[in-house]
Image: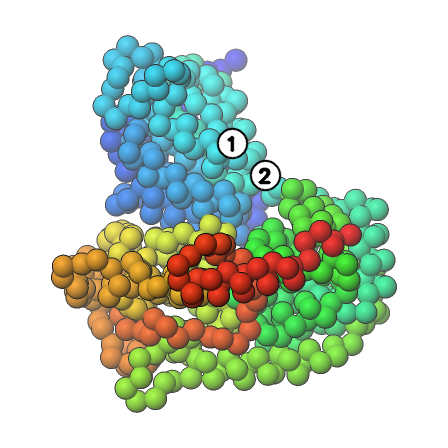
Amino acid sequence: MATLRLTAAQAAVRWLAAQHIATPRGEMRFFAGVWAIFGHGNVSGLGEALYEARDDLPTWRAHNEQTMAHAAVAFAKQARRERAMVCTTSIGPGALNMVTAAAVAHANRLPVLLLPGDVFAGRAPDPVLQQIEDFTDGGVSANDCFRPVSRYFDRITRPEQLLAALPRAMATLTDPAACGPVTLAFCQDVQTEAHDWPVQFFEKKVWRIRRPRPDAAEIGALVDALRSARSPVIVAGGGVLYSRAEAALAAFAQSTGVPVCETQAGKGALAWDHPQALGAVGVTGTSAANAAIAQADLIVGVGTRLQDFTTGSRALLDGARQRLIQVNIQPYDATKQYAEPVVGDALRVIEELADRLRGTFWPQGDHAQAIAAWNTASQAAMAVPGDGATPSDAQVIGAVRRQAADDAVVVCAAGGLPGELHKHWRTRSPGGYHVEYGFSCMGYEIAAGLGVKLAEPGRDVIVMVGDGSYLMANSEIVSAVAMGLDLTIVLLDNHGFACINRLQQACGGAPFNNLWADTRHVVLPEIDFAAHAASMGARADKVANIVELEQALASPVSGVRLLVIETDPATVTREGGAWWEVAVPAVSARAEVRDARAAYEHHLSGRRIGDAQ
């Protein structure tokens, strides 16, 4: 057998560069590149190997391990899970900085390969710099923190272990049901050790994402349920987009009249003005979508994990009156909330439904009227405010949407903005809405904008971020500038964590430690965000009002530009929405908390958990 003598790091990099994926756009390398912050533990091993392969597997320098992994996660999401990126760090703090981003990928079922450096497998120099010592387990390192947020985890303590570990990693990254982050903790001495590798190991490999068809009995039960339903509703989740089933879903909804509402991950599955599009569902949902859910006798989830924002903490589900069927490629998700499962690929299921229900039509009833009423309310919420008024988040969203290209991508995560975007952003094409709400991670936004732009360089990318999230993570502005990317960042400055301030007061609490004005401070800071962004190479301006914002957005994008606008921390869209369970203290000296507790208990008494069939 022909062999090739390489270090373990060289072998790993060469193997990764040989992995390809079959996509609707043809074959391409599965790994688009590597994000690296070097240190002891990866600079001499993986660093040297990546230098040798820099033309086949490009390496980018980042400025924070967490945010570079966010960029990689966002790339995978925007690429519909058909491609991924690699992230490598030193041992210790560098590795642990990636754990939060690993959790983002885990919660959202997104592929990313994490290669943190690890301690010496030989242990001769222990304890090395940044090594965590467990007094009861000599095999533990800081990288064990990745175990609960990895779909597959391995520690490479011998070079030849890569012969099994790397294919297992790829099998996980390309499995539509098991997809998620993979961590290969790579011991630093092992990275530099030589081994005679089979030449065959490095041959080009083309992977294909499976599209399993549903079980005959399960799809039959779904067809029968739809035929007997009077008012079915489809809840479209991210699985519709990852399966590239949006065109099939649009055609099915058009031909059958079945209305469709969308989760955060599923937004964009239908164009906003599709006749059967009800818009967002749940806590941040439209009045049209939530009314349809309340009236439905059959709810069909497609590619959604039914988190609490989708179900209104289960209050929107009435198992005594409604039937819930979950179409999902992952059995774990398909059986949630007492649902009847249909396990299979979203596109294959929709295609089969369309074939078997050809000629069947459900009259829309009053859905068209409800959609029109919501669109009117949404338009009013996004309208330009009167002279001198501080704009709301919705009014800023309206300005951005009016100036955005039809195929522009909006990027956001966490806080109040995702709720307003879910309600109001008018998505015109698939992939035009990129909001991380599976883990709701502050600090994702700017780095994600970079990842989205790498995934789809031909589309305008607009990051919308609050001042609190900006202060948490902004360093990848430097990376975007250095990479010559065109990126627009709209920073909404409401002087604190306004979303949590509103939630605090809704639970009866006094305004405390969220807005800057309500914190314990000696000096109230006046932050010049435009000057800060400009110091990192961005073109940055502060605008006084919505008119100035639209004028600035109308100019062509060149490089990284940041626009700052002050917003009202109290105003939020009241139309639409549903209850969200946030526990309220049972004992308090404050009357406001006691009143909130009474309201909380009232909602609990009306929730229909346990009534499901």
Determine the residue positioned at 38% across, 85% down.
Answer: 384
User: Would you say residue 267 is visible in this rendering?
Assistant: no
Relative to 419, does residue 114 appear above or below in the rendering? above
Determine the residue positioned at 84% across, 69% down.
Answer: 359
C-beta proximity under 8 Å, tags 2 and 1: yes
**Numbered disc 2: secondary structure:** loop
In terms of depth relative to the viewer, which is nearer, 204 or 211?
211
Residue 87 in the image, given as x and y percentages of width and height: 37, 38
Give the labeled residue for mark 1: 152
- Give the side of residue 169 with respect to residue 478, left or right: right
Residue 426 in the image, given as x and y percentages of width and height: 51, 73
In terms of depth relative to the viewer, which is nearer, 601 or 453?
601
Q: The disc labelled 1 sits on which kind of residue?
A: Tyr
**Numbered disc 1: secondary structure:** strand
Mark 2 Cα within 10 Å, few/some/many (few <14, many 20+)? some
User: Would you say residue 275 is visible in this rendering?
Assistant: yes
In terms of depth relative to the viewer, which is nearer, 513 or 75?
513
Determine the residue positioned at 52% across, 82% down.
Answer: 377
Q: The disc labelled 2 sits on which kind of residue?
A: Ala
Specify the quadrant of the image occupied by residue 356: bottom right
Give the labeled residue for mark 2: 178
Specify the quadrant of the image occupied by residue 208: top right
Relative to 426, does residue 434 appear above or below in the rendering? above
Residue 170 in the image, given as x and y percentages of width and height: 53, 34
Mark 1 Cα within 10 Å, few/some/many (few <14, many 20+)? many
How many numbered tags mark residues here? 2
User: What's the distance in space between the residues labelled 2 and 1, CA to CA?
Assistant: 9 Å
- Give the side of residue 433 with respect to residue 52, left or right: right
